[in-house]
Image: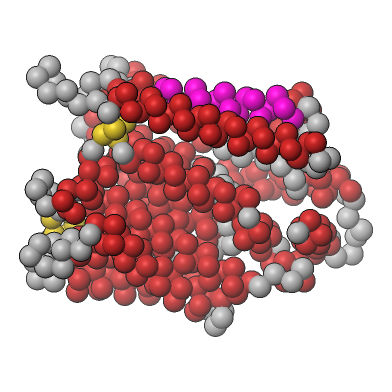
Amino acid sequence: MAKAQDEIRQGAVEASLPDTPPPASAAVDALPAEIVSDSLASYLRTRAARIRSGDSGALPVLLGLVVIAVAFQIWTQGLFLSPGNLVNLFIESMVFMTLGMAEIFVLLLGEIDLAAGYVLAVGAGIAAILVQKPGFDWPWWLAIIVALVCCGLTGAVWGTLVSRLHLPSFVVTLAGLLIMWGVMLVILGNAGAVSIASPILVNQHVLYEIVNGNIPPLAGWVVLALVVVLFGGVLWARDAGRRRRGLVAPPPGLTAIKIALFALSGIVVVLICDANRGSATSVVDGVPWVVPIVFIVLLLWVMLLQRTQFGRYVYAIGGNSDAARRAGISLAKVRTWAFVLCSVTAGFAGILYLSWQGGTSTNVNGGQYVLYGVAAAVIGGTSLFGGRGKIAQAVIGGLVIGAIYNGLYLQGVQVQWQLIATGSVLVAAVLIDTVSRRGTLSGSSTRI
């Protein structure tokens, strides 16, 4: 495994400088700062140096999110950061975040999936129809599985056309957008809308409660404690074990800070969600079920991309496909699976949309949703050129989009200005990505 990784890194450097022997610093600069640092102080110095050279990661979007929050908090006279609105903000942003996670799989390869928005609509339509009574009346869990499998199969088609027949992903998925739009209309039929808001039909009610149901406050604290202990224990044991074996690992101080920040973030989320979001006569509190559900999806995809061979291959292909091919990586296989995972995640976003709205209809604007998904990934820091980006950044980008819409909606701003504001933020994100890439490349040329 280690030998294969070394070959990939070495091949990437050689391909980028075919006539010049690569210096040792070039390979080191490509590694994460926590890997090449032997202490917390060294990590901070390395990160600061890389930020100055243009590798700012998610820092710009985090600063942008803070600026947006402060501005809207002042503009709405304290309403924006109220507990009730913050919970609504997350619920409104969940589809953007999930679609952003979906798009990252293909964006890392330098590809794009324009069909994901209507894959979302088809996934929602399939799940909604399968739990109808009279009708199929399938168990809710089986309806979700079938919907996700169908969405994954569409991704396999797009991936095969792109990877095996070498068709442009833009054209393939643009055609897929039209195809899935038509499939959505066929599935929903003449009725044009399907509801799952029945409180007495169990399978419909469970789907509805995914977003609209809440975890009891006490149970929320218990779950948080268990998750923090599990996460912290696994992270600390893994890093300590690597250090004992003489392998590269983050400094102990950095590991401790990660665990502390994770625990602090969880405490803040639970405190916000446990505040009463109802009225004096109707108490609504507790963490919405969708929060841990989206977190689990995020954790799974983070582990897949950052802790598995498949993830390393995705980054290798996106960074330099020729070097990855010479290292023995099957480009077609990895690309196909990336499109499959993109469509499966988009289908899951459809399940969340179905639960959020209490149903689905032919009015779903899949074209608009896929643009928001791409925007969430790019605003979060994912490069359109491939090879750079993280799943967690899509969550931050989705929150930025949701914050813009939420804040402007609270002020009664018309939808056209909401679109203009979101588009402007997207242009700014792409500009930052382009400038940072130029800064990184010029820095590499200087070192050489």
Visual colour scheme? secondary structure
Q: Which of 150 and 375 is in front in this view?
A: 150
Can residue 224 be found in the magenta stretch? no
Residue at 37 percent of width and 67 percent of height: 149
The answer to whether residue 149 of the structure is visible from this angle is: yes
Which residue is depicted at the point 39% across and 39% down?
292
Q: Is residue 139 above or below residue 167?
A: above
Image location of residue 392, percent across then percent down:
51, 42
Q: Residue at x 20, y 63 (%)?
A: 138
Quadrant of the image containing the N terminus: bottom right
Q: In this view, does 182 lie above or below 77?
A: below
Q: Give the range drawn in magenta.
A: 251-268
312 vs 24, nearest the viewer: 312
Q: Position of residue 87 (x, y in %)?
A: 30, 30
Q: State how many labels appear.
A: 0
Query: Based on the displayed image, in which of its 4 quarters is residue 274 positioned?
Result: top left
Which secondary structure class fits the magenta region best? helix
Nearest the eye: 157 or 110: 157
Confirm whether the magenta stretch covers residue 264.
yes
Residue 223 position by quadrant: top left
Question: Which residue is at the far right?
Answer: 21
